[in-house]
Amino acid sequence: MSEASFPGPGSDGEQPPPGDPARDETVGEPGGVPEDDWDGDAEMAAYIADLEAGRARIPEEWEIEGPAATIGLGDAADVDLAELAAMVGPDGLGGEVFARDRSADVMRPGPVLAALTEQAAGGLGRLTDNQVIGAMSAARRLAARAAWLELTAVAEFTRRCEAQYEDAKARGVPRGCRDGEFPDAELGMELVTSQNAARDQMDLAGDLQTRLPRTWAALGAGVIDEYRARLIWRPTRHLTDADAARADEILAALAPGLRYDQLARKATAVAMKLDPQAFQRGKEQARQERQRVQAGREESGNAFLSGRELAIEDALASKAHIDALAVALRKGGLPGTLQRLRVLAFNDLTQGRDPLDRLAGPESADDAGRDARQDKPAAGGHAGDGDGSGDGDGDDDASWDGCPDMTQWQHERRGTAEDDDHPDSGGVPSGPPAPFPALINLTVPAGNILGWSAAPGEAGGWGLTDPGDTRRLVEAASRDPRTRWCFTLLGPDGTAVAHGCARGSHPWIPPPGDGQRNRDGPDARQAAALATLLRDLNVTFTPIAKGSCDHANAENRYTPSRKLGHLVRARTATCPAPGCGAHAYHNDLDHTVPHPDGPTDECNIAPPCRRHHRVKQAPGWKLEQPEPGVMIWTTPSGRSYTTRPTVYEM
């Protein structure tokens, strides 16, 4: 941003060239230049003359490369106007304003700081290290301010919907038909996120404004970021307003200087001290509503399996049992670090095996079992080598300090390295995988399992699987008699064009391969393997309607057949609501236009989750399916969102 960045009094907003004061008179003012007499050509000629005479200069490239901006000052920024004039002058935007304790380094976030930061970002190479860090700090304050602005709007939207809902409730409107009943669904579509995440954002916005004013002010001033505000909010949700205000006073002052994990721990400790009973009620409510065994995909591509919202004593007791088994396995001579042996014991216990059976001979297993019982510490203790001193093995799950191991601060929570005298081969276990029923949908590119494609598979809610994992999963699932094979053919754009299923059980063994992946498609051997697989499974494919509908699969009934349901769910693999990732396999099969006015056909059936099925039927909502799989959602606020058939990885 330079002097030329601010619109001037010219007809197109340009600044008058410096030089002759006689040309600086106000256009249209008494005694000034009459508005109709303004002559752009004459002004340009005068400017060129000034350049030639040395009375004006051509701006540097960096001065004009940033976007022009019209900025209303006043309350927009805490900056002295004389100081602002110096900042935007020819010597003021070289980055010095971002140096430590200079104007931009301490400026409250707003349009002036945004303009300065944008200008600096266009020429970071000119700045010193000190100034680059200052610009980075300014960007962080601006991001916090942007989050504050978003949450301000979220809070207002929430208040309006709550008022509509309460009014409808007072008038005796039944549930499911009340105005303002699904604000989280509407917000989730705009934010492209789940309804739970949207509701979380609504609760956060409301509580920050009404119960945590100091934290709210710190976020608006850019002193803390949104995540720190969230860490303060979470453990204080169950406190009274008075206790929440006290926690706010303590935590808002400390938050700027604490890491995420430190702030999470401190916020939890403060909430516990202020009202232990309220904190306990919050734990009990979470156990009742969210206790579960959860499995999913790690960022690395591996998987996790965990018990969530457990009672602390149960989790500690289970962990102690696994620790003791790991020590017994090591004493029995099983190679590997304690961390690796804990994983072996965990897998065995959750798959119905006795970990001690890994030791050679029943006598060894019996001895190890006695050792495991002797070495098992009380809940809250430490499982050592059996000599009470511990062995230095890192227990990388330091998670009993009141804060979860969230990915945002994983790099700040490193455990002690495992000792090196117990090598661990790691890798994929040898031998064929144990059979399991494909009660989840395994979405598997044929080229993945037959060797010509590296496109990932997908295992239900577990996420993406690489070719090696995919082949092992398919092999394991196919060996269970309850598994059924279904195939979906994809078009060049990755959408489904046909679908068919095989009858009965068909165990499958991966064909030998050389590991070569052919981006151009299958070679003759791989194509033959696919043809053989389809022939052996005796699959008959049915085309999936796309673009227009020929009603070839229309049914004269209310409930769609299994075949029609498969076609719809192959076409649209998740709930068609924006931001919802619920897998279609578990969702409803809903008529977009209610039956019997709407047909039971591909062009009028979609697989929404139960929640969005109810949303679609609420007042003010509208759902259209102008062509098969293309869903247009219109919310009570009048905004529209379109989703389309699933595009699979190829």
Image: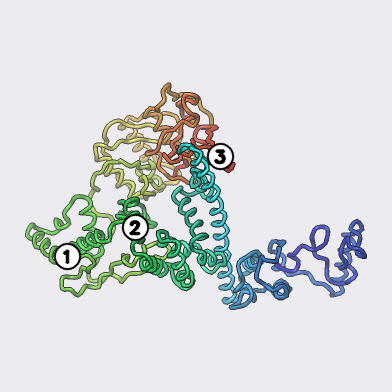
Q: Mark 3 belongs to which amino acid?
A: Thr
Of residues 26 and 422, which is closer to you in this image? 26
**Residue at the disc numbered 2:** 281
Q: Mark 1 belongs to which amino acid?
A: Lys
Percent across and percent down for residue 272 are: 36, 66
Q: Is residue 1 left or right of residue 495?
A: right
Q: Mark 2 belongs to which amino acid?
A: Arg
**Residue at the disc numbered 3:** 634
Of residues 426 and 228, which is closer to you in this image? 228
| Local SS, label 2 | helix
Q: Is residue 114 left or right of residue 641?
A: right
Mark 2–mark 3 Cα distance, whole angstroms, equals: 39 Å
Of residues 342 and 455, which is closer to you in this image? 342
Percent across and percent down for residue 349 are: 20, 54
The furthest residue to the bottom: 101
Mark 3–mark 1 Cα distance, whole angstroms, equals: 59 Å
The answer to whether residue 335 of the structure is visible from this angle is no
Verify CB contact (< 8 Å) between mark 3 and mark 1: no
Residue drawn at the location 17% of the way across and 73% of the way down: 388
Q: Is residue 631 left or right of residue 476?
A: right
User: Mark 2 or 3, which is nearer the eye?
Assistant: 2
Q: Is residue 532 above or below residue 318?
A: above
Pick whichever of labels 2 and 1 is earlier in the sequence: 2
User: Mark 3 or 1, which is nearer the eye?
Assistant: 3
